[in-house]
Amino acid sequence: MTYPSPANRNPLDEDCTRCPDLVESRTCISWGVGSLEATLVIVGEAPGSGNPDLDRWKGGNHTGMAYTARHSGRLIRSLFASLGYTHTELYFTNAVKCFPSNGTGSNREPTGEERSNCRSYLLEEIDAIEPACIVPTGRHATESLLTATGRSLDGFLDVVLAPVYTDRLPPLVPILHPSYQNVWIDRLGYTPEEYEQAIGAALIDLEAGPEDER
């Protein structure tokens, strides 16, 4: 499997040291990857530990590219392929670009400070691509984007699949993080097939524009 090259970055960013704990735990920074003319920007939480011994799907902590892990990367890319999106329409990135270790080699949740330190990189990517829509996957990605607009997140499940309009960013359509979607789909009242169909319908409806513009 091959991936598009990561977006061009300022060389000064390649050794970012804003978060000392992440500098210590990461193998490499996991930058966004995909088309710079993408229709959708898919935003994850942070790269996982990954597995450098795999031939493919090593994970962003080893490939340097977001959503290239065997579980979450494969799931999210398969989801959007099944919805009919091609690689020229998609750009994948993370709210936090480095692997947050829990000290034993597994993931921990990124801290608010880590999300804040990485937010300028995320906003630069979005501004450069100018997508029609942003799809945050999971609570942390959604919260990071809303914070950039001066808004807070009370209940994540309440905003899943509900378009969020802000003055600062393209519309958001939050979805479940692929690593946890099987746990939460029932809470939303969907079967897996219905959930996938609902994502597609939400995106189609959003791309058609708000009702008052139709």
Image: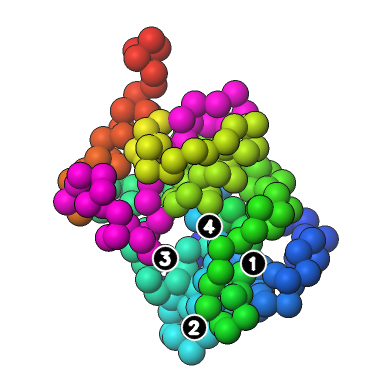
Query: Which quadrant: the C terminus?
Result: top left
Q: In the image, what residue type sits under mark 2?
A: Asn
At label 1, counting other C-alpha atoms closer than 10 Å, the crowd grade (few under 14, some 14-19, many 20 or more) is many
- Residue bearing mark 1: 98
Query: Which quadrant: the N terminus?
Result: bottom left
- Residue bearing mark 3: 73
Q: Is residue 172 covered in magenta? A: yes
Q: Quadrant of residue 143?
A: top right
Which of pointers 3 and 1 indicates the residue nearer the eye? 1
- Residue bearing mark 4: 45
Which is nearer the eye, 23 or 209? 23
- Residue bearing mark 2: 51
Which disc is residue 85 wearing? none
Residues at marks 2 and 4 touching, judged by CB atoms closer than 8 Å: no
At label 3, counting other C-alpha atoms closer than 10 Å, the crowd grade (few under 14, some 14-19, many 20 or more) is many
Q: Alpha carbon of mark 1 to alpha carbon of mark 4: how far?
A: 10 Å
Query: x%, y% of residue 152?
Result: 57, 36
